[in-house]
Image (cartoon, grey):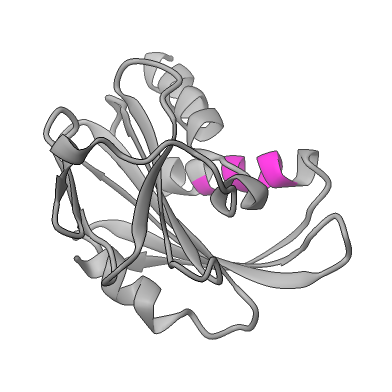
Amino acid sequence: MLWIRACVFAVAVLSISVAAQERRGAPLVPADMLEGQRLVDKELGLSILAPDNWVWVWLRQDEEGIRNFSATDPAGRLGFAVNVSRVELDWTRKNAEDVQVGMAKKLIAAGFEVDRRVFEPSAVPISNSYRFVWAIVLPNGESRFRFGYVAHGAKRIVSFTCIGTDERQPEEFTRFVRS
């Protein structure tokens, strides 16, 4: 039962909305967590390279061991969210899908429509990860696509998400997740 509570907690934390991903004015990641364009969170064992000239922001730190970051392009056209939390659970397809379903439920509660189209195993960013694609309708009626990956390793869950205007996953996002 402990893993169920941990999974539910992780789902709540990992489920930031589209608006939060595109939010401006969030605090920048501290300089001691950056190596050029690479975000390095030693506490949570995270190292991710953002595209050239992008800015890393720290969306929030709700609890110890939970972090939410975003890399945003200078023009504000595209942003990638990274959510990491410490969770001890057996990593199964069912648990990974529960995390992804929890993210969708959070968007639905915020007034979005979500059509979960793809949920498949992936070797990106690490083996035993999962990739998902959703068609979403924002509360203002605009249609978009949400792309994401969910991974588990070293007692942590990491998710990467991005919003696109069509069904093609942005190439920059694929490179970002692989970094």
Residue lying at 64% horizontally and 52% vertically, measured from the top left? 18
> Residue 154's x, y, as percent?
15, 36
Check if residue 101 falls in the magenta segment.
yes
Q: Which secondary structure is most common in the magenta stretch? A: helix
Q: Quadrant of the C terminus?
A: bottom left
Residue 151 in view here: yes
**What residue lies at 46% left-to-right and 80% top-to-bottom?**
170
Task: Specify whether 152 is left or right of 120.
Answer: left
Percent coordinates x, y for residue 141 in the rendering: 88, 65
The front one of 76 and 97 is 76
- Please indicate whether residue 58 sits to the left or right of residue 50 in the image: right
* Relative vertical location of residue 149 with respect to residue 61 in this rendering, above or below: below
- Total marks placed: 0
Q: Is residue 99 magenta?
A: no
Residue 66, x across and y down, in percent? 36, 26
Q: Is residue 56 above or below residue 12?
A: below
Residue at the image position 37 percent from the left and 41 percent from the top: 28
> The N terminus lies in which quarter of the figure?
top left
Q: Quadrant of residue 62?
A: top left
Residue closer to the observer: 75 or 42? 75
Q: In the figure, residue 6 lies in which quadrant? A: top left
Per the rendered image, the range of residues in magenta is: 100-107
Residue 114 position by quadrant:
bottom right
Q: Is residue 92 visible?
A: no
The residue drawn where x is 39% and y is 44% is: 57
Where is residue 139 drawn, in percent x and y?
85, 55
Left or right: 141 in relation to 86: right
Above or below: residue 100 compared with residue 11: below
